[in-house]
């Protein structure tokens, strides 16, 4: 049974955005679950597209979840570590499996290349400490790739293999193609394609049929439309899909060419993705099927802060190197007493407790808010996002997890982020009573 208070509050909040054409948000889905995997609320709002006669958004809608894939790829790598097929800190293993990395150089600010000084480990890849970046966040990488350019949303392994590093390994956190490389490491160590591994070792044990890098015909029928807000515009328009190759691939030959991107390759229903989060709430055991897909100590390790020496790693401004793909914003997640995103806080500020300037943390593939959050989340809550404005969180302390999903570019849409915070806050308000 859903919590009626949370359900009604989130429905009203989401509808206030999707019913207003000025927001440019055609539709969203928000779903939250408890430790038993039961839905606290499951709210579809609006339509699948802004075009005329588009279907209503529903809980069967499939979204390209982009970087929300990173959690799944990391769980797969951790399973391989448990089986002794991979090691988090064996640089020689990574070098042997991926000899291409021996040739990768570091791109300097002046556009020249220098030799790499440190070997790369799987842990560095899973913590974004290996030195790789993303062309839509890093201007020097964007410029270096031109006139042809880089496109990590092309489902082609060559885009990953050809990118230089943007930092010396193990020196600074920077978000990038690191987990794409982690997926390659897994495939070469096991002889199993990443999506096949995820299906066999995560989705099937959890009983989930609608999370896939190669969406099934049924998933394709329920696909949400992709939208674009061009720079300087608030209203959105439907656009060609950002990640179309896996959707149009039909024959086995076509599917074989698709790169299994650990960084951005999955499509999913949000109400199934949150069952993965519920499994993490339960220390690696599904509350629905009883399957233990990760050891409890492995989940603990994933939620440990891996970069304690960089307590402010995500407080640097994030540039919009490609403004059609991402907005610029001051930091990844506002935790300071001074409100950095005043427009996104649609719940009462009087209900919030600010904690000054708490240190930031990064686990194995996700950010950690180490102190209680303004929405009501507990300590050491994991969260991350997808570039088409999807956000998830997983709070092991309070036994709550959830996801909000949309399909609109560029990343950092304040309307969607505002609903993420507002609906998350409503969930905690309801379950605390």
Image (cartoon, rainbow, N blue to C red):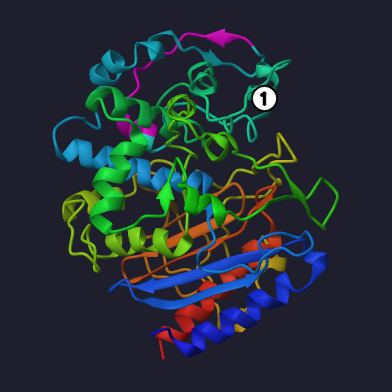
* Left or right: where 386 falls relative to 1: right
* Left or right: where 390 falls relative to 99: right
Q: Residue furthest front?
A: 251
Of 419 and 406, nearer the camera is 406
Residue positioned 34% across, 17% down in the render: 119
Residue positioned 61% across, 65% down in the render: 28
Number of numbered discs on residues = 1
Q: Quadrant of the rendered structure where residue 328 is?
A: top right
Query: In the image, is residue 117 part of the stretch drawn in magenta?
Result: yes
Residue positioned 26% across, 44% down in the render: 200
Q: Which residue is mark 1?
A: 142
Q: Residues within 10 Å of mark 1 (few under 14, many from 20)?
A: many
* SS at mark 1 in the image: helix
* Left or right: where 48 falls relative to 374: right
| Residue 167 drawn above or below residue 388 | above
Query: In the image, is residue 49 part of the stretch drawn in magenta?
Result: no
Instruction: Let me know if residue 363 appears in the view.
Output: yes
- Stretch of the chain drawn in magenta: 112-125
Of 163 and 329, nearer the camera is 163
Q: Position of residue 150 (x, y in %)?
A: 63, 23
| Residue 405 drawn above or below residue 93 | below
| Residue 346 drawn above or below residue 413 | below
Q: Position of residue 317 (x, y in %)?
A: 65, 44
Of 61 and 119, nearer the camera is 61
Residue positioned 32% across, 65% down in the render: 278
The quadrant the C terminus occupies is bottom left
Instruction: Let me know if residue 307 appears in the view.
Output: no
Q: Position of residue 384 (x, y in %)?
A: 48, 52
Of 325 and 255, nearer the camera is 255
């Amino acid at each position: 049974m859903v919590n009626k208070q949370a359900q009604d509050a989130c429905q009203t909040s989401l509808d206030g955005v999707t019913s207003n054409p000025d927001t440019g948000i055609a539709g969203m889905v928000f779903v939250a679950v408890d430790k038993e995997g039961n839905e606290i609320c499951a709210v579809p709002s609006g339509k699948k597209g802004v075009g005329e006669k588009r279907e209503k958004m529903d809980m069967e809608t499939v979204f390209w979840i982009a970087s929300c894939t990173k959690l799944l790829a990391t769980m797969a790598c951790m399973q391989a570590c448990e089986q002794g097929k991979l090691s988090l800190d064996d640089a020689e293993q990574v070098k042997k499996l991926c000899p291409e990395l021996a040739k990768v150089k570091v791109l300097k600010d002046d556009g020249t290349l220098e030799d790499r000084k440190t070997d790369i480990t799987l842990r560095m890849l899973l913590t974004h400490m290996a030195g790789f970046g993303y062309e839509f966040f890093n201007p020097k990488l964007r410029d270096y790739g031109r006139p042809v350019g880089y496109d990590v949303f092309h489902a082609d392994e060559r885009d990953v293999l050809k990118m230089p590093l943007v930092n010396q390994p193990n020196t600074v956190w920077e978000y990038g193609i690191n987990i794409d490389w982690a997926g390659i490491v897994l495939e070469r160590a096991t002889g199993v394609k990443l999506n096949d591994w995820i299906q066999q070792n995560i989705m099937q044990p959890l009983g989930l049929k609608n999370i896939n890098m190669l969406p099934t015909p049924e998933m394709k029928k329920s696909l949400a439309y992709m939208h674009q807000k061009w720079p300087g515009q608030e209203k959105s328009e439907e656009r060609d899909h950002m990640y179309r190759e896996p959707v149009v691939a039909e024959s086995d030959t076509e599917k074989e060419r698709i790169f299994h991107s650990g960084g951005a390759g999955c499509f999913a229903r949000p109400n199934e993705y949150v069952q993965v989060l519920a499994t993490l709430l339960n220390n690696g055991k599904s509350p629905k099927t009883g399957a233990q897909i990760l050891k409890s100590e492995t989940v603990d390790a994933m939620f440990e802060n891996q970069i304690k020496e960089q307590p402010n790693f995500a407080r640097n401004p994030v540039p919009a190197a490609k403004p059609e793909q991402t907005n610029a914003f001051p930091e990844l997640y506002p935790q300071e007493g001074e409100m950095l995103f005043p427009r996104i806080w649609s719940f009462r500020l009087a209900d919030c407790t600010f904690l000054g300037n708490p240190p930031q943390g990064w686990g194995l593939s996700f950010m950690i808010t180490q102190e209680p959050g303004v929405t009501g989340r507990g300590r050491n809550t994991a969260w991350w996002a997808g570039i088409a404005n999807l956000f998830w969180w997983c709070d092991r302390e309070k036994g709550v997890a959830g996801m909000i999903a949309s399909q609109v570019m560029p990343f950092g849409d304040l309307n969607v982020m505002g609903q993420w915070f507002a609906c998350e806050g409503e969930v905690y308000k309801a379950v605390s009573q």
